Image (cartoon, coloured by chain):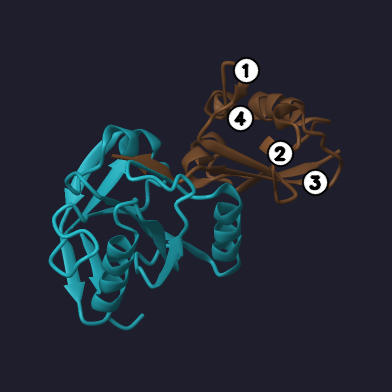
Amino acid sequence: MLTIDQATYDAIVRHAKRDHPDEACGIVAGPEGSDRPERVVEMVNAAGSPTFYEFDSTELLELYKQMWDRDEEPVVIYHSHTATEAYPSRTDIGLASEPGAHYVLVSTREHGNNAGPVEFRSYRIVDGEVTEEEVTVVPALPGA
Amino acid sequence: MAIEVRIPTILRTYTDGEKAVTGEGGSLSALIDDLEANHPGIKDRLIDNGDLRRFVNVYINDEDVRFIGGLEAQLSDGDQVVVLPAVAGGC
């Protein structure tokens, strides 16, 4: 199960809507081993594409170095689908390389840049195996 | 000649869970062969058809090796190498 606080959830949805029709991508970092998504880091989609996303390689290194310095890991890796459902594509599954992360998919196909609900779903992707999990949005994460 | 190599989570099955290992080599290619000798199987996860895999990033002292010669990029004692899988996907 993914437990995420409302402000973090809203930040991901805002990012996805803002970047529509391109795919938005980013992570939510948290202390290693805590499973707490605490710090949203929006990434630039270096592919700048409605059908593909990729973190810029230089920014990727900076991001990981920052997380190592802080003893963090990517708790959530999110991206949007802008014309299809919020389910990992074959490419998403093939390229998923953080077996410990929650892969969040947001679909903006319904309302695009405008207000209105989005599909927000979360998965584990390990060795090509996709398992959907429940998402629980809480007002705030419980105290550490 | 020791080069520290940072290993991403997904490849730590080849390094007994170690986050960083030490290797040797005057070029990235030689370093990867040296890693393979001590951590069998890791080379295939980095190289495909004689070239770096498209969705694996390797950095030498913070420089993406694609801009400094790829597998032929030169290494010297004390260099730091980081391996990071790309974070990518598509619908």
Q: What residue type is labelled 3?
A: Asp
Residue at left 70%, top 24%? B33
**A44 over B21 or under it: above or below:** below
Q: Mark 1 — on which chain does it sit? A: B
Q: Which amino acid does label 1 sit on?
A: Gly
Instruction: Tell me the CA gap for discs 4 and 1.
Output: 18 Å
Residue of label 1: B50
Instruction: Tell me the CA gap for discs 2 and 3.
Output: 16 Å
| Nearer the camera: disc 1 or disc 3 | 1
Q: Position of residue B66 (x, y in %)?
A: 67, 36
**Mark on residue B39?**
4
Q: Which chain is brown?
A: B
Quick one: A61 or A98, which is closer to the camera?
A61
For disc 1, the neighbor class at 10 Å (few under 14, some 14 to 19, many from 20) is: few
Is any part of residue A16 visible from this angle? yes
Residue of label 3: B79
Q: Where is residue B5 in the image (x, y as percent from the top left)?
A: 68, 43
Q: Mark 2 — on which chain does it sit? A: B
Instruction: Tell me the CA gap for discs 2 and 1.
Output: 17 Å
Q: What residue type is labelled 4?
A: His
